[in-house]
Image: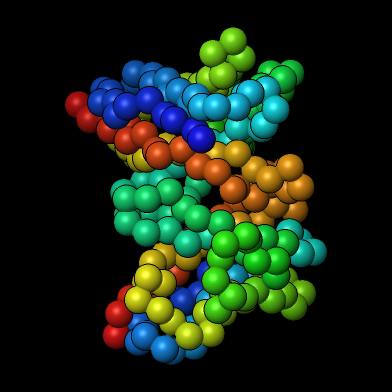
Amino acid sequence: QLVQSGPEVKKPGASVRVSCTASGSTLSTYYIHWVRQAPGQGLEWMGWIYPDSGGTNYAQNFQGRVSMTRDTSISTAFMELRRLKSDDTAVYYCATPSPYGDYFEYWGQGTLVTVSS
Amino acid sequence: DIQMTQSPSSLSASVGDRVTISCRASERISKYLNWYQQKPGKAPKLLIYSASSLQNGVPSRFSGSASGTDFTLTISSLQPEDFATYYCQQNFSPQLSFGGGTKVEVK
């Protein structure tokens, strides 16, 4: 089970960090992907982190603005997005793929990030 | 990046109808195509993976097929709980991507 941190309200230009905790399992076993969804819009893949090594793969749209990290001692992954803009207002999900391919079997409950002056 | 184009963006249907949703990839992705269902305020739910494999626990009225770069999700007999938005997603490229979604509404 993936449990995410609570809602955030940020001003334009600020940064936000969202956490995703693997409850009842070892984080390092699974890739953690991040997907976001703006209000009334579709799903947008942001990237992944492999907690065991710390390796990452970011979507080109977010290169230079996103960082995905982890703390395996507390089974938690983090997604930080910098230089926030109003169109970064969205629900941010973490998700884990199947061991057999990058399709998402398990999702966090989502974290609403609101960017507003 | 691989672009995924879904059609239609929305449709109206009645309980018992057969519903088909299309997804086209901008380039060849073999069978690396997955389908999700999302209801308001909820995280997406995996329905179909690898174009045509039914996820455990998903009713058999859902099916997926592939032809070249065209993929189809079919609901054989729409049930009340199936009114939702459906998304396709490719995992052929390391840069994953989703389609824009198809909202299935009550007619």
Q: Would you place residue B42 above or below residue A54 in this image?
A: below
Colour logic = rainbow
Q: Is residue B60 visible from the viewing direction of this image? A: yes
Image coordinates of residue B50 in percent, x first then y, are: 72, 62
On the picture, is B54 further left or further right than B78?
A: right
On the picture, is B73 further left or further right than A111?
A: right
Q: Choose top left, top right, bottom left or bottom right for residue B68.
A: bottom right
Residue lying furthest top: A73
Image coordinates of residue B26 in percent, x first then y, are: 68, 64
Q: What residue is drawn where x is 50% and y is 55%?
A: B45
Count of numbered marks: 0
Q: What residue is drawn where x is 43% and y is 58%?
A: B38
Q: What residue is drawn where x is 42% and y is 29%?
A: A4
Residue lying furthest left: A117
Image coordinates of residue B24 in percent, x first then y, are: 63, 70
Q: Would you place residue B29 above or below residue A4 in this image?
A: below
Image coordinates of residue A114 in percent, x first then y, are: 28, 33
Dividing the image into 4 quarters, which one contains the C terminus of chain B? bottom left
**Depth check: B77 or B12 in front?**
B77
Q: Is residue B33 visible from the viewing direction of this image? A: no
**Depth check: A43 or B83 in front?**
B83
Q: Would you place residue A71 above or below residue B83 in this image?
A: above
**Depth check: B5 or B14 in front?**
B14
Q: What residue is drawn where x is 44% and y is 30%?
A: A3
**Depth check: A78 or B68 in front?**
A78
On the picture, is B84 further left or further right than A65?
A: left
